Amino acid sequence: MSQTFIIDGKTVPFEEGQTIIQAATKAGVFIPHLCYHPDFKPHGSCKLCTVKVNGRQTASCTMRAMAGMVVESDTEEINAERRALTQMLFVEGNHFCPSCEQSGNCQLQATAYHLGMMSPHYDHFFPNRPVDASHPEVLLDFNRCILCSLCVRASRDVDGKNVFALSGRGITTHLIVNAKSGQLADTNFTLDDKAAHVCPVGVILRKRKGFAVPIGERTYDKQPISGTVDAVTEGH
Amino acid sequence: MALNDMHAEAVAGIVDRVVTRYRRDPTCMVQILREVQEACDWIPPEAIDRMQALLGVPRTKIEGVAGFYSFFYTQPRGKYRVLFSDNITDRMLGNKAMMDRLCSSLWVERGKVSEDGLVSIGKTACTGMCDQGPAMLVNNYAVAGLTATRIDEIAELIRGKVPLAEWPAEYFRIEDNIRRADILLGSDLKPGDALLAARARAPSDGLMASNMRSWREGLPTGLSGPISMLDEIKRANLRGRGGAGFTTALKWEACRNAPLKAGLQRIVVCNADEGEPGTFKDRVLLAKYADLVFEGMTVAAYAVGATRGFVYLRGEYRYMLDHLNAVLAHRRRENLLGNNILGIPGADFDLEIHVGAGAYVCGEESALIESLEGKRGTPRNRPPFPVTNGYLDQPTIVNNVETFAAAALIALNGGEWYAGIGTKHSAGTKILSVSGDCERPGLYEYPFGVSIRQVLEDCGAKDTQAVQVSGPSGICVAADEFDRIIGFEDIPTAGAFTVFNNTRDMFQVARNYVHFFQHESCGFCTPCRVGTSLLKNLMDKLHNGAGSPYDFTEIEKLNQLLQSMSHCGLGHTACNPVLDTIAKFRPAYEKRMMQQDFTPAFDLDRALAAARQMTGRDDPAAHIITEESGEGA
């Protein structure tokens, strides 16, 4: 017999050990998220999936579901805070959607639309983040990195390669690659790696394949991100 | 050739020696990096090559760890690396003038390395010398009580390339400044006495350590010794001294009762990552009462059934390492550490010191454990909690230095004795680290319940405007609240007590603290990583005369977000100093407000700073406005 909890008034069943977001997603309830991916161990860093459990806020990707808990997610208060977090991510990096290859496939952009973000609100940081075009097949545009660590987890846990890692601290935290030169070309990264296909934004880009699907016909052009609960980020 | 260029073979030799001593154990990564840097003056790529080969871990892991801690350098730094402590108390004592003096004397720009690679000069967060500032670290060794004369002497030593070991010993002398002693600072515990008292209290059939229970589990009498120790801690009503005030006995009991998988052990960790600006009590406890602290840890190990322990010593206290290791060696000789301690069967416990490397966030217990495991000091997702899944997934207790010292005294004198000191809700004493505007800065130990006013009187504070209790993450107490008391029922504290007289600008105090949090945010979660930077920018905007009421609203909204969305306490408390000072010292903010509803943060004159620097000009004609611009970052 399966147990249940309540999210935004809806009764949701869950299995022992499932997190709130896992159970909610299965029941068709969308919770905004960026660093969470169903295939990987949750990280709990972007905080977009924060919900209120019995009055206390917690990340729904790391919090286990418990019978009878009352979860608030799609409320004006929480969505306003999620919107502010999204704005923070926009000003922290350099995100120019109109010229970005991932526009329409980007989870950050789609989440911003979902949350009704109308402007970046905060002053831009305009960090200096050079791109890495050394690899024959793949371009790394760090300007768009939101430090979700999905590529880190994919490379470590699936590919067994540890191509990516986070270094630095605080606002200078940044993605590094596994080479003395610091260049992707000097790693054993290939386009077949799982890590090549998990970036929720536009950092890890396949070369010579740009704009294969026209803008207007991309994933989130067809339906909002909240409509894709079952098919989160399956490739590009 | 620059001074810090070393041949690759020499670097490899150093790495080999260090890594071998740490048994090629990647969990000792932070210690290995520290020792490699001590020998090479930085962590060159060749050292990482060698570590990668010897430790069998990916380069990304080593670079990720090295990049996290402020005191590790993956770019060449000076042979002499000078870091000025930049707590608000250092600023009040004139650290900027000292730093400028050293920079100009040695012809080096702040934050840069001199062209000959001899010296680099920068700033660092509070080094725990607030009672004897301004202070600095030279190659991570503390030098306190700086004067202009001392700065000139140091410049001369550096210019003459005199090795640090040959500098006058008095430069490195750190005063204890114990002004008021009670049970802890007045303790003359003989090493072993607390353990002997605990043993004497145990029924004779209970003289068996908890970690023997894997085979004694079913026997009804075998564990009464450790349990009676735990009962004393319960009776004492001891609460954690690191600030949060969690009930110590509950933590110990949870660890004790946590299931243990085969081959694993329980762990006792002493949190000596005393990073909260304004706090320096643990420095003195470890310098002068190390036996008391280690004995407290051993008592804890006996009570919870732990066999391994660590002291996580903040990098700023590196100078104490040899002393602490000597105390440990002595305790081993006296059978106060090791196997069958004092002849108690199964009482096996030993501990080692791990030195941090400049990361305030490692004072958070799960980040501390990550660091102990040789990783980036990022707080973990909880649950599970350390009491069940701590160091290398083993049941672990993490307690403050002062908590362990108190535990030793409880073992010696009993829980009832201890509970009789202090107030109903706050048993025992609290050591306050008093600094700032007062005649007698130093340590003051009081039974809980002492009023702010009493402390101010005792330390010789005059015309006091405010006291920051428990550091930036604590609360700012204004003059009309000086009858409030130190205790969990009113003002809980980890011990910092920073005094500000009427001449101080409380806005600058708050701004200093905001800069601190921004620097120390680990960067893991979005709200804290970006939010502390936004907050810093807002405070700088006010400082630069571009503040407006709009910014007040923004600060309040950021506070809400940091409190509700952040991953750990650092983010939750990062807005405290601003909110407290806005509520209590609003005029300090209002005088910075322009009359407009909104003023943009962009400032044309400031944007030209880079152009001025490149052209070497800073005359009035090179400025759009001529207002004093005192950027402190």
Image: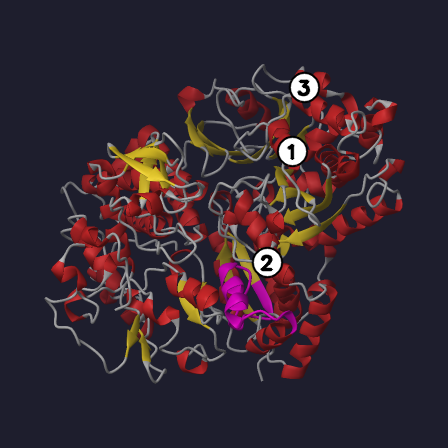
- Residue B66 inside the magenta-drawn segment: yes
Categorize mark 3 by other alpha carbons within 10 Å: few (<14), some (14-19), many (20+): some
- Residue B197 inside the magenta-drawn segment: no
Mark 2 vs mark 1: tell me if same chain: yes
Distance, label 2 to label 3, CA atoms, is 37 Å
Categorize mark 1 by other alpha carbons within 10 Å: few (<14), some (14-19), many (20+): few
**Residue B600 visible to an observer of this rendering:** no
Query: What is the chain letter for disc 1?
Result: B
Q: At numbered mark 1, what does the secondary structure look like: helix, strand or loop?
A: helix
**Residue B164 visible to an observer of this rendering:** yes
Image position, residue B454 (x, y; %): 55, 20
The residue where tag 2 is placed is B374
Instruction: Choose between A33 and B181: the one closer to the eye.
Output: A33
Q: Residue at the location (61% across, 65% down)? A: B33
The residue where tag 3 is placed is B235
Q: Earlier in the sequence, mark 1 or mark 3?
A: 3
In the displayed structure, does residue B237 sit left or right of residue A36?
A: right
Query: What is the chain letter for disc 2?
Result: B
Q: Where does the N terminus of chain A fall, quadrant-wise?
A: top left
Residue B355's quadrant in the figure?
Answer: bottom right
Q: Residue at the location (10% across, 66% down)? A: A216
Highlighted magenta segment, given as a residue range: B54-81
The residue where tag 1 is placed is B257
Q: Residue at the location (23% across, 61% down)? A: B605
Identified by mark 3, the residue type is Arg
Of tags 1 and 3, which is closer to the observer?
Answer: 1
Instruction: Choose between A170 and B510: the one closer to the eye.
Output: A170
Query: What is the chain letter for disc 3?
Result: B
Q: Where does the C terminus of chain A fall, quadrant-wise?
A: bottom left
Label total for image: 3
